[in-house]
Every structure is written in structure tokens, then in C-alpha cells.
Amino acid sequence: MRIDSIFYLVPQSYTMRIARGLCLFYWKLVVASLLFSLFLAGLGSGSVPFFIGTGFAFIFLTPVFHYLSYEVNSPGEYYFYYNLGLSRLVLWVSTLIMSILVGLSIMFL
Amino acid sequence: MSGLHADSIRKQYGDRQVLNDIFLSCKTGEIVGLLGRNGSGKSSLFKIIFGTLSADNKFVSVDQRLMPSLFSGRDLIKYLPQDSFLPAHIKIKYLISCFCGKAARGLVMADPLIQPHLEKQAAQLSGGEKRLIEILLLVHSEAKYLLLDEPFNGLSPLQITAVKTIIQKHAAVKGFVITDHDYRNVLDIASRIVLMDQGNTRVIKDLRELIQFGYLPKSSLDLYAGGETNL
């Protein structure tokens, strides 16, 4: 089951639709960032504990993937989220918060 | 003062005053055709009304409610940009669930224009198919006012006819502001025409005025039998 299909089952309200929009926004960021973080942590596992390395890499890579995916590669996609009421600032702030929360969670696994 | 009102909109790029105290209004039931040459500021005006572009001065309200930001107008105004906005790697059926309420979602998914594409990702669709889906998503959203920037761009004649029918059908409960260089299709469905010229808006009552203000060539008059449209 894809992560976005979970939100497809959630009751319909405007807030939930915004939550679903955020989920779609972060889906490709989280997958790419997590895979790359695992790869980097695997490379450095001799010197840094695996989960610490993964979480640390995730915190820094997620904003980088946000920048590359949405600012460089497909800035037009922002309008999909603008139409849901999510501004660029909101998306950037939530990227930073999400990356820190998820990254710290991974570090303390 | 019901309806969408944009007033006193000013925007300057460097030394160039693109929008000079612009006024634009739209009520539900209206299709306002916004025409203007390249660089006249049509897209800038739409982005300012929508809330994604800052203006030097602006006043935007919907049904007497001020719209100072993108978030305040999230359930009232939606905007179709010139380029495709669909996230490339998400299935169309999931995108529909972000835009439409439960009732509208069923309608959109049953629409014969969308049904063949529900399981596809936007990246697998042609430019015309993407445009059509974007328009249907916006039209079936809860927004009362839609700003459509070049909705006919990339559409086949059959798709254009379908889009015009959809817009006219939904104009009973929504207000549309449409701009497109395919002015004939805009003229076909518009209940009112506004021309953007030298940073100002002019209400057009007769097709001949579009020629007078240098938007249309003189030869275009023959196509509309002496300037008679549904204006």
C-alpha cells in the first residue's frame, strides 16, 4: 500500500485535504532522503553509529531534496499546493520541522 | 459588495509600471474574459489576486471578506497557472481527493474525460490531458472564483469544446476570470470582456474597441460579423 493511499481513506474535510496534500508533497522527499541517508550512514558506519548517521544525514538531506525537487526541477508543482492554501513559506518551514523531528527520531532509535 | 473585487492593484518591475491602479471584479454567474498583449500583466494580476505574488499595493476581497494572503483565500479562489501544476509522480485519483469534497470526488472520478486516467500518474499524460484534468479539478473544487490563465493552451479542438461547456455549466454557481491568447474561444464564452492596456483595465463593449486599442488586427472584425459577440 502506498503512503498516499492511506490518506485516501481518511474522512473528507478541508483540513484533512490539506494534510493529504502535505503527505503528497513529502512523499517523494522522504523516500529519496531516507534512502540516501541510509546509504551515507552505511558508508560511514565504521566511525559513526548507524542510526545516528542516518538521522543526521536525514536532517540535512531533506531540505536539499526539497530544494532540488521543487525549486530547481519542478517549481510549477508549487501551484498544486498553493491551490490547497499552502504557501511556499509554510512548505519550507514544515520541511525543516519534519526533517528535524524525523531525523531526531531515527537518531534515538 | 458581493463577488470577487480586486482594486488599487499596483505592481512595478524595475522602472516599468506593469499594473497601475487596476480594478477587476467578478460575480458568480459571470465569465470575465481578460485580454491583453504579451507582457501586459495579466498573469501578474492573477498571481497578485491569488496571493502568490506581492504587489506594491492591493485590495482583494471576496464577498466582503478581505483576502490579504494565499491562505485566507484557500477555499474561495483557485488559480490555473500557464504551466502544468500536477505533481508528476502521483496518481490522478489521489490528486482528486486533495481538491474535491466527497460528493464532487465521485462526480469527477465518474467523468468520462477523467476516468481513463485515474490510475495514471501525471507524468504519463500528454500536455492536453494534464490541462483538461487541471481544469476539471479546479472547476469541481469548492472555490467560488477561478482564475484561469491560458486554459485552452495545448488542448485539441474537441477538448476545447469540452472545457468551454464545463466552464459555462459551472458558471451558474461560480465566477470565472479567463485569459487566453486564443481570444476567439474567450469571446465565445465570456459574458464580459476586459482589456489590459498600458497597465490599466478597460471594459470592452464592442469588438471594434479591441482593434482600436491595438489588441486585434483589423482583419479579425470580419470573423465576428461587425463586432457582434455575446458581449
Image (spheres, coloured by chain):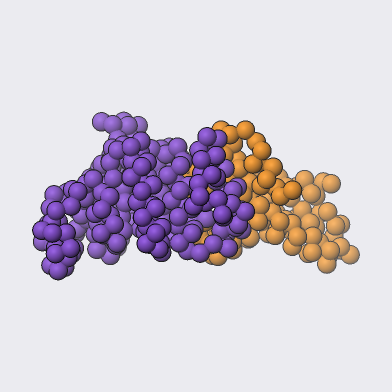
Q: Position of residue B75 (x, y in %)?
A: 45, 37
- In which image quadrant can residue B7 be found? top left
Q: Nearer the viewer, residue B135 or B230?
A: B230
Residue drawn at point x = 70 percent, y = 47 percent: A3
Q: Is residue B147 in view from this perspective? A: no
Q: How many marks?
A: 0
Q: Nearer the viewer, residue B210 or B197?
A: B210
Q: Quadrant of residue B4?
A: top left
Chain B: its colour in the image is purple
For this view, does B187 lie left or right of residue B212?
A: right
Which residue does the image show at 26% across and 59% down from the upper left?
B183
Q: Residue A95 appears at what percent x and percent y?
A: 62, 50
Chain letter, colour orange in render: A
> In front: B56, or A22?
A22
The answer to whether residue B193 is left or right of residue B134 is left
What residue sits 28% from the left and 54% below the top?
A: B186
Q: Is residue A69 among what the camera can see?
A: yes
| Percent coordinates x, y for residue B55 in the rendering | 33, 50
Q: Nearer the viewer, residue B97 or B16?
A: B97
**Position of residue B144 measured from the top left corner of the image (x, y, whole percent):** 38, 37
Residue B111 lies left or right of residue B196; in this view the side is right
Residue shown at the point (70%, 60%) measured from the top left? A32
